[in-house]
Image (cartoon, grey):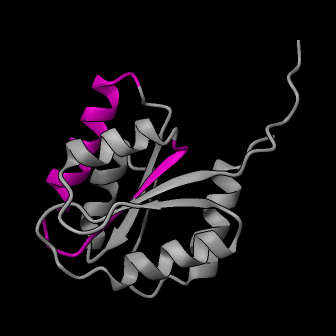
Amino acid sequence: MSSAPSTSPLRVVVAKPGLDGHDRGAKVVARALRDAGVEVIYTGLHQTPEQIVEAAIQEDADAVGLSVLSGAHMTLFKRVIELLADRDAKDIVVFGGGIIPEADIPLLQELGVSRIFTPGATTTEITGWVRDNLGRD
């Protein structure tokens, strides 16, 4: 039994977890995703992992994009992934970016993070990855 392709746009929650107060990059990515036809829910600054997961579930998001500059990326990404699993929402893709050491990227991927974009990643690269990896057939 085949189902018709979904015509609804992709939905991505863009979030700034933790105490980091710099959200310019997150806003640039959110705007680029919107311009590419993605529905974006930007949660604002100082969100807890619990708030982010709740927003993703409530908004029926396809993915969560986390922006972390504070150095707490290992803890914050891990907690979001754990909470998604606890809420039976492991189908929500987690990706992100920020100031994240190259050595930590494989560890984050082992935790279940689909992709990390480091400084210098272009909005075209990010929107292309979202379209290629979250697109529905």
Q: Position of residue 92 (x, y in %)?
A: 48, 39
Q: Is residue 95 above or below residue 58?
A: below
**Residues in magenta, as a range:** 61-88
Q: Is residue 75 magenta-colored?
A: yes
Answer with the quarter of the image where residue 84 lies.
top left
Quadrant, the N terminus: top right
Q: Position of residue 95 (x, y in %)?
A: 43, 56
| Residue at far top of view | 1
Relative vertical location of residue 125 with respect to residue 130 in this rendering, above or below: below
| Residue 20: percent from left, percent from top | 15, 74
The residue that appears at 30% across and 48% down in the rendered structure is: 52
Q: Position of residue 34 (x, y in %)?
A: 62, 70
Residue depicted at x 48% and y 42%: 59
Residue 88 position (above or below residue 33) = above
Relative side of 47 to 131, left or right? left
Q: Is residue 3 visible?
A: yes
Q: Report which quarter residue 5 is drawn in.
A: top right
The quadrant the C terminus occupies is top right
The residue at 47%/82% (across/down) is 28
Foreground residue among 7 and 96:
7
Is residue 127 on the magenta stretch?
no
* Position of 113 relative to 47 (above/below): above
Is there any visible trace of residue 111 in the rendered image?
A: no
Residue at screen point 37% across, 50% down: 109
